Amino acid sequence: MVGYRARQLAAIRDAVAAAREVLRDNGTDDPLVFAEVFVAEGGIQVPGCPDDEAAMHTLGEQLLWALASGRCYHSEDPDLQREIDRVYNEVQWVAAQRDDKIVGFFLQLPASVKRSPAMEALGHSNNGLGPGVFRKGDIVVLQPECDGVRFIAVLEDEIEC
């Protein structure tokens, strides 16, 4: 599977930060608002094709259309499904930042991903809250091989010392 290049990961991370800021400033958890900012900030990237502006534009339009029409399952297009999932995950992270009881998110790997040595290592990485738990303020950009990963909210009383 083709992955994102370093500059693509950086572009996604920067666009996520900008979109999260707009949601926080506006006090909303609207996925379409997040997506509009994310697309406008250049967050849409096609794995392995950092210079394919036409493909990025098309994917951005498809994302906005899917969210506006409520069609959030596109198994026939893994790039579109990845972006839809990213939007909903990020909106969840923004909402969690308002809840003092939530301290982070646990990276839940699907069985298909667990076989990857890189993903297994990521699932066992420790960022100070325990293996596979990321702080709620972190911006986690995963490679396409991680499709299907879920983030589960972790409460402060669930952290083991």
Image (cartoon, grey):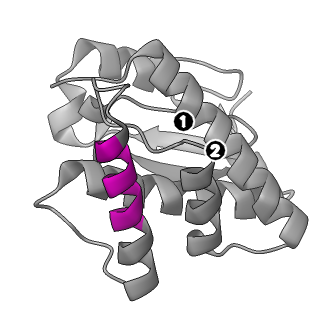
Disc 1 to disc 2: CB gap under 8 Å: yes
| Residue pointed to by mark 1 | 12
Q: Secondary structure at mark 1?
A: helix
State the residue lying farthest toward the bottom: 69
**Magenta stretch contains residue 62:** yes
Residue at 56%, 30% in the rendered image: 11
Q: Is residue 29 above or below residue 141?
A: below
Query: Which quadrant of the figure contains the N terminus?
Result: top left
Residue stretch in magenta = 54-63
Q: Quadrant of residue 99?
A: bottom right
- Horizontal relation, residue 105 to residue 49: left or right: right
* Position above or below: 89 against 140: below
In the picture, measured across the screen, residue 58 lies left or right of residue 42, that is left
- Whether residue 41 is in magenta: the answer is no
Disc 2, SS: helix
Q: Nearer the viewer, residue 12 or 131?
A: 12
Q: Which residue is mark 2?
A: 16
Percent position of residue 108, x then y: 40, 43
Q: Is residue 50 left or right of residue 103?
A: left
**In this rendering, is residue 95 above or below 2?**
below
Magenta stretch prevailing secondary structure = helix
Q: Is residue 124 above or below residue 152?
A: above
User: What amino acid is found at the position of numbered circle 1 in the picture?
Assistant: Ile
Q: Amino acid at mark 2?
A: Val
In the rendering, at what x and y percent does residue 58 appear?
Answer: 32, 56
For disc 1, the neighbor class at 10 Å (few under 14, some 14 to 19, many from 20) is: many
Which residue is pictured at 63% across the width and 42% down the height?
A: 15
Q: Nearer the viewer, residue 123 or 27?
A: 27
